Amino acid sequence: MLHAIRTALTLSQPAFVEFLKANGLRGRLSRQLLSKVEKGDADFAVAVWEDVVDALLAGGVPAADVAALRPVEPTMLPAPDNTPAFRRSQWQTLADRLPSSRWWRHLGRLTLQVAGKEWETRFDQLQREHDIDPEAVLAEVKRLLELGGTPAGAGTPMPGDRVALEGDESARTARGGRQGLVLFRVRLRNAGTVLWRDRMLYRLGAPVTSELPFVPALVPVPATEPGESCEIFVPCRAQFLRSLAVISYVMVFADCSVCVSGRLQLYVDTQGVRFER
């Protein structure tokens, strides 16, 4: 485009540079750089393009001829809609890549580095006591996310679907030191008339910050008949700051759409000295 304008003005490259300067171009513009820009081998800085366009307009070149030369201001693209399909695709990508992570392959080493030997030993003990197999949990989450991309995994909320929490709030509260490890034991009762199948608990909000604990984003929910209960284990690393944090989960179908109203809330209070659970 710049070459076409220069050709229309019947100016050589040196004469074109002088033309631009005579019409207000600021700074130095070499013939060599102009030649490279015309060939597409180089580019002007945004400020230089603005000056070139202004100089061309001042020299009488029609605005329609130079409009394409004016640089477009970069803009931030709007965030994608947080739809169930978008959430599922995000977490499916992460779940697919997780097995290749060196930290996933050495969870004990990560726990040791983050929390120390005492908690590494305790956390390993908690998992063994409750028969928690991280590999099996990951495999189930991957299965559900893959299922969520098919018609069979797209659930529809039903009026008779109900969930209730068993036990008092103390069972869902951990008090202790910063970055400590704890395992929440949560019992959910199917208080409705709909069979729970292929469901997960989906964590709301940021995965982790200095003020928020780190817990799994997705926790599989065992198949549960109406009137029956299921037990769910949620491993947690406490937040860094001394504060009271709230972790919120909602129950979702395999496609990450909400299937029942209400939320599960877990509390982590790091204002104490050590965990009491």
Image (tube, helix red, strand yellow):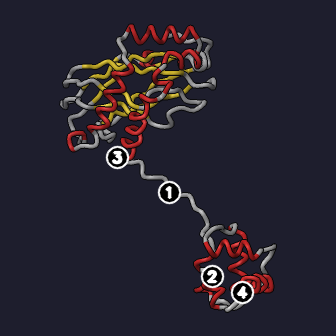
Kindly identify which residue carries mark 3.
Answer: 85
Residue drawn at the location 70% of the way across and 89% of the way down: 11
Amino acid type of the residue that numbered disc 4 sits on in the rendered structure: Ser
Inter-mark Cα distance, 2 to 3 = 47 Å
Q: Residue at x 43, y 31 (%)?
A: 98
Please identify the quarter of the rendering in which residue 17 is found.
Answer: bottom right
Q: Earlier in the sequence, mark 4 or mark 3?
A: 4
Q: Secondary structure at mark 2?
A: helix
Quarter of the view holding residue 146: top left
Whole-number angstrom distance, CA of label 4 to CA of label 3:
57 Å
- Which of the two labelled residues, at mark 4 and mark 2, occupies the earlier sequence position? 2
Closer to us: 82 or 170: 82
Work out how far the residue at label 3 is from the one at label 1, CA to CA, in angstroms. Answer: 17 Å
Q: Amino acid at mark 2?
A: His
Q: Nearer the viewer, residue 141 or 42?
A: 42
Dot 2 and dot 3 residues touching (CB under 8 Å): no
- Label 1: which secondary element: loop
Circle 4: element type: loop
Horizontally, residue 34 falls left or right of residue 171, namely right
Residue at (23%, 25%) from the top-left corner? 223
Q: Nearer the viewer, mark 4 or mark 2?
A: 4
What's the amino acid at mark 3? Answer: Ala
Label 4 sits on residue: 12
Residue 100 image offset from top left, x and y in percent: 44, 29
Label 4 or label 3, whichever lies nearer to me, is 4
Q: Which residue is mark 1?
A: 78
Q: Say which of marks 2 and 1 sits in front.
A: 2
Residues at circles 3 and 1 in contact by the CB criterion of under 8 Å: no
Location of the N terminus by quadrant is: bottom right
Q: Are marks 4 and 2 in contact (CB under 8 Å)?
A: no
